[in-house]
Image (cartoon, rainbow, N blue to C red):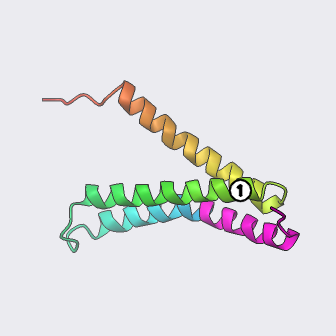
Amino acid sequence: MCVIANEKTTIGKVSLLSSISGVLLPVISMNLTTMFRTKFHVDAICMNAAFVVLGLILELLAFDYGIAARRTATGIVGLSISVIALSIAVGFVVFFFVNPPRMCW
């Protein structure tokens, strides 16, 4: 499949924007959820888990588009941000499965 250079720059911009929003959107949403916890009648843990899943989906999208536009500068930056964010997420998951938090009763 032949992709035109202009389309690759657009895909690179999508990769960059989705990688940045995949990091910022869950953080901002979790802060707003904890600030307005009394106004929401939903458990804050469920809301925060949904925001984390949304961030991971955006990071996977940025990873895919970054691979597609790896020849452009925005594609490289988007790919590197998504690789860093996904490796931190995998590190947290592995750490908490190996060392689950102990309950202090």
Query: Is 84 a magenta residue?
Result: no
> In the orientation shown, which residue stands out farthest toward the right?
5
Q: Where's residue 41, x and y in %?
A: 18, 70
Question: Which residue is depicted at the point 50% across and 57% down?
Answer: 57
Tag 1: Cα neighbours inside 10 Å, few (<14), some, or many (≥20)?
many
Q: Based on the displayed image, in which of its 4 quarters is residue 45 positioned? A: bottom left
Amino acid tagged 1: Gly
Q: Is residue 87 left or right of residue 33?
A: right
Q: Could you tell me which secondary element the residue under label 1 belongs to?
A: helix
Query: Is 8 a magenta residue?
Result: yes
Q: Where's residue 20, x and y in %?
A: 61, 62
Q: Is residue 25 left or right of residue 38?
A: right
Please state which of residues 41 and 4 is positioned toward the viewer in this rendering.
4
Q: Where's residue 96, x and y in %?
A: 37, 32
Question: Which residue is depicted at the point 56% across and 65% down?
Answer: 21
Q: Based on the displayed image, in which of its 4 quarters is residue 72 positioned? A: bottom right
> In the orientation shown, which residue stands out farthest toward the top?
98
**Residue under pointer 1:** 66
Judged by its main secondary structure, the magenta piece is: helix
> In the orientation shown, which residue stands out farthest toward the front?
1
Q: Based on the displayed image, in which of its 4 quarters is residue 48 positioned? A: bottom left
Question: Which residue is depicted at the point 43% across and 30% down?
Answer: 95
Give the extent of the magenta segment.
1-19
Q: Is residue 3 left or right of residue 42?
A: right
Quadrant into which the C terminus falls = top left
Q: Is residue 5 above or below residue 43?
A: below
